[in-house]
Image (cartoon, helix red, strand yellow):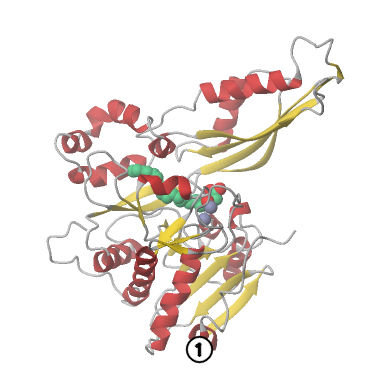
Amino acid sequence: MRPSVQLWYISTDVFPAVFSTKFIQHEIIGGYSHLFTVQGSDPQLMPYMLLAHMDVVPASQEGWHVPPFSAKELDGFIYGRGTMDNKNSAIGILQALEFLLRRDYRPRRSFYIGIGHDEEVSGHKGAMKIAALLKARGVKLSFLLDEGSVILDGFLEGIKNPVAVIAITEKGSITANFSVEKEQGHSSVPPKETSIGILAAALSRLEQNPMPNLFGHGPEIMILEHLASEFRFPLNLIMTNLWLFSPIVSRILEQKPSTNALVRTTTAITMFSAGIKSNVIPPSAKATVNFRIHPSQKVEEVLEIVQNTIADDRVKIHLQEAFDPLPISPWDNHAFGVQIFRRTLLDVFPDVSSVAPGICIGNTDSRHFTNLTDAIYRFNPLVFKPDDLPRVHGLNEKISVEGYEKQVEFLYQLIQNSDINKLPEPHANSHEL
Ligand SMILES: CCCCCCCC/C=C\CCCCCCCC(=O)NCC(=O)O
Ligand SMILES: [Zn+2]
Ligand SMILES: [Zn+2]
């Protein structure tokens, strides 16, 4: 089956300078993905990489203010599937580069642009192949920037200003298929339990018994530690004394889905199918459950908890895909990428008062690049309010025109800021960055 991508916008017509510049090489990888190699003028500087993807999850035709693939503009917003996840980055990166090239800019530091075509189905044919190709060419990266976190505005009770959260790891994942088989028969003489009843009860046990709250066992605590001074009194005192207050804070965080996802391995029953006719005892019931693994756990440990919670041998478990949480990227004054992001945020988003390390609660193509660098960061320069979160993979995904322009500006500055060969001095102003 062909992936659901539109390729027309990555073309010579739309980005003439990108495609005609001598020091830029363009390759198609895996049939649809793009790899651009931008050769900098100083080969001594270690290259970096910008990553994005152009494939999207499906969109229902109902419930949208405009058709989901029309990219129509309404009240200052561009609506459409992929406007936040992640065509905004794919086009934004190329547009920033196009602008720079038109101003005769030649970067000093080389960089790669990878635009995958199958991120939403694990990136095995796109990003994974790009990573393998770069590895075979002996490439090492100073840092890599992908999607995965944003500038949060109004997510945390008690913080007034928008804060940029750059994910330094991402959760692991298990996609498991559960099934129960039972003898088919006449519905007038039903057994005590059907395959549907057995499977539904097992899944209900999984939902009713969430995985343990692991706040404080992984890097999620760093978000609050870094943002402590942003909280109003007395929350700032609580956040600066998490050694004492973490039991209370962990209970508060688990109340909302967006913060619950930070403190535990989550369990989402995403597919269920069973039954063939209203008067036939169903021969089988099947379900798919997607777990996103907290950074302090591993696949094995989660599977053991699942087995013990279900505690029913009639329920068979088949793993579709499973991988551990990703390594934690450096976050200190020597982390080149982090310093570049800070400086660029300060340049472009003066309202952002803090930059904190965080966790990507979903998964990204960047996880295929761990052989090329230990400095993998997931961050999209978009200001997110709480009602934006359900739009990702949901209805009425949209980006404001101003927000998209800011994204391009961020990338435009980031490319230039990355050209320095040593870490910048901290800015001498009152800004908290
Ligand atoms: C301190 C408050 C934390 C709030 C946490 C919510 C922040 C949400 C920020 C961005 C959300 C969306 C990005 C997730 C990227 C996932 C990309 C994707 O869809 N990959 C496929 C997959 O995971 O299945
Ligand atoms: Zn995405
Ligand atoms: Zn997505």
Residue for point 65% across, 69% down: 32
Q: Position of residue 264 (x, y in %)?
A: 44, 33
The quadrant holding residue 19 is bottom right
Relative side of 251 to 210, left or right: left
Q: For mark 1, does the 10 Å Cα neighbourhood hold few (<14), some (14 to 19), or many (20 or more) residues?
A: few
Relative side of 114 to 401, left or right: right
Three-letter amino acid code of the residue under disc 1: Thr
Q: Position of residue 364 (x, y in %)?
A: 52, 54
- Can see residue 398? yes
Which residue corresponds to mark 1? 21
The quadrant holding residue 259 is top left
The quadrant holding residue 43 is bottom left
Relative side of 78 to 418, left or right: right
The answer to whether residue 267 is above or below residue 75 is above
For the N terminus, give its image quadrant: bottom right
Q: Position of residue 121 (x, y in %)?
A: 63, 52
- Can see residue 48? no
